Image (cartoon, coloured by chain):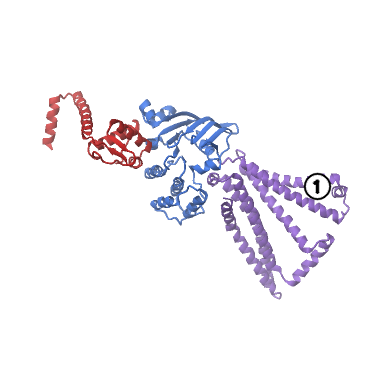
Chain colours: A red, B blue, C purple
Amino acid sequence: MAVDFENSIPIYLQVVEQLKSDIISGKFSAGERLPSVRDLALQLKVNPNTVQKAFTELEDMGLVFTERTNGKFVTEDIALIAKHKQEHADIITQKYMKTMEKIGFDKSEVIFLINNLGGNR
Amino acid sequence: MELLQCIDLNKSFGEKKILKNVNLTIPRGKIIGLLGKNGTGKTTLIKLINDLLTISSGQILVNGNPIGVESKKVISYLPERTYLDKGMTVEKTVEYFAKFYDNFDSEKAYKLLKELGLDTHQKLAKMSKGMQEKVQLVLVMSRNAELYILDEPLGGVDPATREYILDTILTNFNDGASVIISTHLISDIECILDSVIFIDNGEIILTAETDELRNRENASIDEIFRRMFKC
Amino acid sequence: MLKKLLNYDLKSIFKVIIIFYILAIFFGILTRVFFGFRNSLVLEILGKISQGAAISMMCSTLINNIMRMWVRFKAHFYSDEAYLTHTLPIKKETHYLAKFLTAIITLFVSFALVFLVLFTAYYSKENLLVFKNLLLPVAEAYDSTIVGLIALLVFVLFLEFFNILQCGFTGIILGNRMNNAKTGFSVLFGAVAFFVSQAIVLAVLFLIALFNTEFMNLFVTNTTLNVQTIKSMICVAISCYTLVSVLGCVTNIYLFKKGVNVD
């Protein structure tokens, strides 16, 4: 899971994004135990404090919770994960639409493109 | 009690002032980059902390004590040169460290040396400089220290070695310990740093948390450094 | 910690001078063997050669002993290796003391070796007799024994060698406090330290002489002094020299404790 980080953006935010996408994609499923701070830091090749900070951020979002002795787990609240997944998808779609609008496509044309994309494969 | 504190620290050689009024506090549990161009006082500061230079004026406190036996027990230092007795074998060198440092973990050292695929019966003199530097790093990181001070650990090494060095540092530093890494190659290590200290012309010109700094300046530490020093 | 340091220091010195020990003993034995045959010119020449070699090896042993100590002192405290030495959790005075004791022990062993070689090469009943007859009048003149005389001579010689060695340490410590030309200054300060140590002994003798007319005769007249005066003078001089050596050690520790500036 080594990730190339963009040095101009706070690293912990990038770790948050990385973990969030792992959770909503189901790579870490609901209720699953997450790797320890130290292990994750080694995998990602970042500072343990950065991972800790990212975990805190995810806990604030409610996606991760700490069991005092056992470590950190993905939330069991499937609805919450779904909500984050939806939000995430929305953000990406909005970005995509903006780009497409810039080069002169409207919504129906985009839908047409997407539908055709499947057909051309 | 702060782990390391420099108070109004000055160092001069004759008329030449190398460090000017350095005030610095290093907390526990952080990885800190000591960043500056070559010849700006990084190594001088590090040598002062390690009792290799005499202080001209000011104070250095480690856990509240001046530099001495107590500070040396908790600081594990990697100089920017090969400094071991080259007539000794790797095995003898490990033995030497184990004898003199109570917090040296021989098992860990042997494990790491084995990973390097090293013949421990070989004399240091017979090894390449790069290999000697790796052995030194292994020895330094095999101590359960409170403060690791690594002077230019990445100077002049290839990308694979760089990765090995960073991995070794990240994997092996003691829980709750701090690491000071001095370097002028910022982009290689900036993603593992908690905070940075910029030093130029013997003066500390900036200390900051890395992520805060990135947020504030909207740029990488490397870029910020270049902007500041126009190099 | 002192014991551990001493262990490494002794090994590092003996590792080198043991070669000279072996060679000296080897030539000592050869000398004896060749001198055993008195009727062959060739063997006698070989004997003379071995004798020369043995003597030069004995000198080399002592010279190398001192040089190795200086080299080790500099390497350990002021070169690349100093980066490890000074970051070990050991007090500066303990570091110095290890070198001090190493100097005494190695010099002692080297002295013993010189005697061993002399004994191997020359010991025989006749030679011993010649030697005794040579020393007896001197010993008797100072109403002492031969053994006492030899012991005194050896002690003074040992003290002298040790003082040279320690003045070298002083030179290295002071020389390395300079910002450049450290080696040059080391030699200079070492020589100065040696002359100062000699001057102190002489000055003390002179001071005593100011209050003691018997002693004063040493400085102002050519007349032979009486044996008792010479004896007490030797006593004073030797104790004074011993004291100066101890003082040198204390000074060195004091200077060394002030800290080092390693390049």
Percent of width and height locating residue B155: 44, 41
Q: Report whether B214 appears left or right of B82.
A: left
Residue drawn at 30 percent across, 33 percent down: A58
Which chain is home to disc 1?
Answer: C
Quarter containing the C terminus of chain B: top left
Query: Can residue B78 be seen by looking at this rendering?
Result: no
Query: Furthest-bottom residue in view?
Result: C39
Query: Can residue C157 be seen by looking at this rendering?
Result: yes
Mark 1: few/some/many CA within 10 Å (<14, 14-19, 20+) = many
Q: Report whether C66 appears left or right of B140.
A: right
Percent of width and height locating residue A23: 25, 37
Percent of width and height locating residue C90: 56, 46
Q: Secondary structure at mark 1?
A: helix
Q: Which residue is mark 1?
A: C205
State whether residue C185 is above or below residue C158.
above
Residue drawn at 66 percent across, 56 percent down: C107
